[in-house]
Image: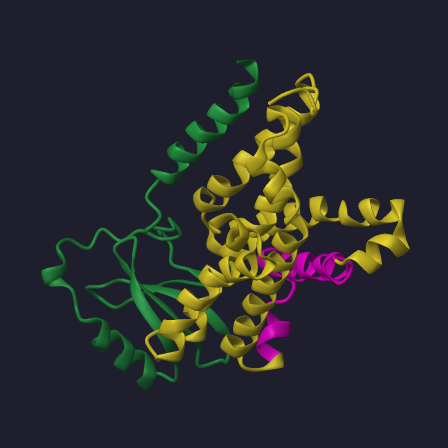
Chain colours: A green, B yellow
Amino acid sequence: MRLFTPLSLAAVAAIGFASVPVSATGVITCKAGPASGWKSEKALSDKLTKEGWTVRKSKVDGGCYEVYGTTPEGDRVEAYFHPVTLEKLYVGRRGEVLFRKKGY
Amino acid sequence: MLRIILNKKLTFWTLLCLPALLMLRPYFFGDLIAMDMLHPTGEWSARFMIAAMVLSPLLSLLGARPWLSWLIQRRRALGVAAFAYATLHLVFYIIDMGNLDDILAEFLALGIWTGWAAMLLFVPLAVTSNDASMRALKAGWKRLQRLVYPAAVLVLVHWIFIHNNIGPALVHFIPLMLLVAARYFLPRRHIFKGA
């Protein structure tokens, strides 16, 4: 039965890792309270568009708004914003950190 | 009758195309954008690559089984499918990025160049996945196809660093790593002894 050890190990590992929540990527976490107090995603995307961003897509990640788009400077990035203040917390390009607010 | 259909080459190719058909549907209906297609195409490419890679270790560990032999006879198709999904992945990446400047700007990020490098290694593997190449390259064919191991390492690094998230990549790669390791560390089973 020793032959099945690696197989069962693999199965256990697979189940273990599959149960890790995949929703939050863990880049940035916002403790912004209940979503009822948040500004809307549209408010954020309107604000960013006005500032010169191109917003391709946005979603909630780690309790923050995560935006995929192009900055006014023309960089293709992934950025995090606080859902209540809409403050910019993090800007990254494929995992390379371009900006991170102190404390986040 | 079922067996005949199951063993048709076309049946296996259709099976391999199925995930692509399912994932492309919402894209063509406009429900998803190119960016959304990156994850499923990449994930399926890795899955087919891993599926092709685990067959030999499984054969060493389990001995000959009918289902295993059935899959081993179709291993090249699995590899070609991995390449096809990787190509789809690259096409959607180019559509999503939209211009060369943006592609070059992020080229050196660890999560990006590893993807390009893996793609580059996939090309000779896919191009030689046919009878004529096997005949022409003789023993060299197997050596060439072993490039899949460095390619797999690149794919793993690409996946982890593109997502800032190690979980989903490991779900796929840990079984592969265990099987490959087991093949080397455990005593081999006599493959042709009754299963």
- Horizontal relation, residue B15 to residue A90: left or right: right
The range drawn in magenta is B101-129
Q: Is residue B112 magenta?
A: yes
Query: Eyeballing the image, is B22 above or below A33?
Result: below
Q: Name the foreground residue: B3 vs A58.
A: B3
Residue positioned 48% across, 24% down in the render:
A9
Residue positioned 88% across, 48% down in the render:
B140
Residue B76: x %, y % from top left: 68, 52
Q: How many marks?
A: 0
Looking at the rendered image, the quarter that the C terminus of chain B falls into is top right
Q: Is residue B157 visible?
A: no
Q: Name the foreground residue: B6 vs B61.
A: B6
Q: Is residue B149 magenta?
A: no
Q: Name the foreground residue: B141 vs B115.
A: B141
Q: Main secondary structure of the magenta part?
A: helix
- Quadrant assignment, res A101: bottom left
Residue positioned 77% across, 60% down in the render:
B124
Residue B64: x %, y % from top left: 63, 29
- Horizontal relation, residue A101 to residue B56: left or right: left
Residue A56: x %, y % from top left: 38, 76
- Quadrant assignment, res B176: top right
Query: Eyeballing the image, is B193 above or below B110?
Result: above
Q: Is residue B48 visible?
A: yes
Q: Residue furthest top?
A: A1
Residue positioned 63% across, 60% down in the render:
B83
Q: Name the foreground residue: A104 vs B69.
A: B69
